[in-house]
Amino acid sequence: MDKPKINFNEIKISSNNLFLKPLSKENATDLFALHTDEEVQRYTDVDIFKNLGEAQKFITEYTKTAEKAEFLFLGIFSRATKDFLGTIRLYHIDYKHRFATIGFQLAKDYWGRGQMHESLQAFLKFVFGELGMHRIEAQTFVENKRGIKVLERLKFTREGRLRQNFLIEDKFEDSYLYSILKEEFLKEAV
Ligand SMILES: CC(C)(COP(=O)(O)OP(=O)(O)OC[C@H]1O[C@@H](n2cnc3c(N)ncnc32)[C@H](O)[C@@H]1OP(=O)(O)O)[C@@H](O)C(=O)NCCC(=O)NCCS
């Protein structure tokens, strides 16, 4: 499959209560706060920004390269308040075999309210629909109970345990590999 003719800078995905769109410069402070919250980042593999400038640079660089459609990074926002809740990213995008990997994180204030569930349902609908993907993967550290719950609630299948494939704070950690196929998502989607 060729790359779809979608400019990643122009994507906007809506659900009942939320919308997903690329970040702009005004979101740098929120992104910096999210990426430097130790509890949020404990089980993730995102870039930890050293200062606000690095968060600003990340957003600027993303805007410059997004049209290549190689990496998708969206903010999650409340429709009612326009508050920033978190982010979802799609990486390792393989248009030939139509698979990619997702990563996701919410600011702590929004945990436990089903906001990521709603965001990912809308995101996966877009990814399997407009973006033409067939298989979506996710990796989560074996101790990340909340991450595991999110994936299993969305009916991802655990395919196996990857032994010591992440080096975290000088310690090699195991992770689970999960996936969901387009037909499985369409069957489960509400
Ligand atoms: C992983 C993470 C996004 C999960 O957040 P979350 O709020 O627990 O996830 P969801 O949006 O699916 O919400 C589920 C919770 O909301 C509750 N909930 C309330 N209303 C709900 C609704 N309408 N639909 C679904 N769940 C609802 C559920 O009961 C559940 O609570 P529980 O965990 O106490 O059972 C969050 O913990 C996080 O950002 N962690 C740090 C980053 C991270 O680990 N990312 C994943 C890497 S793989």
Image (tube, helix red, strand yellow):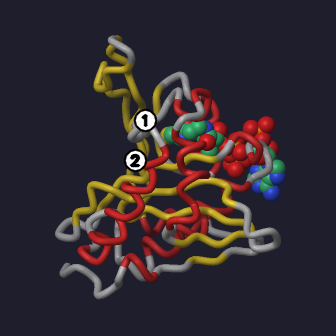
Q: Position of residue 56 (x, y in %)?
A: 44, 56
Crowding at label 2, few (<14), some or many (≥20) Cα neighbours within 10 Å?
A: some
- The correct choice, above or below, for 132 with respect to 119 in the image is below
- The correct choice, above or below, for 148 with respect to 187 in the image is above
| Callout 2: SS | helix
In front here: 143 or 66? 66
- The disc labelled 1 sits on which kind of residue? Lys
- The correct choice, above or below, for 82 with respect to 101 in the image is below
Q: Position of residue 133 (x, y in %)?
A: 35, 70
Q: Position of residue 155 (x, y in %)?
A: 57, 52
Q: Which residue is mark 2?
A: 54
The residue at the point 24 percent across, 74 percent down is 68
The residue at the point 61 percent across, 53 percent down is 86
Q: Which residue is mark 1?
A: 50
The residue at the point 62 percent across, 62 percent down is 76
Can residue 19 be seen here? The reply is yes
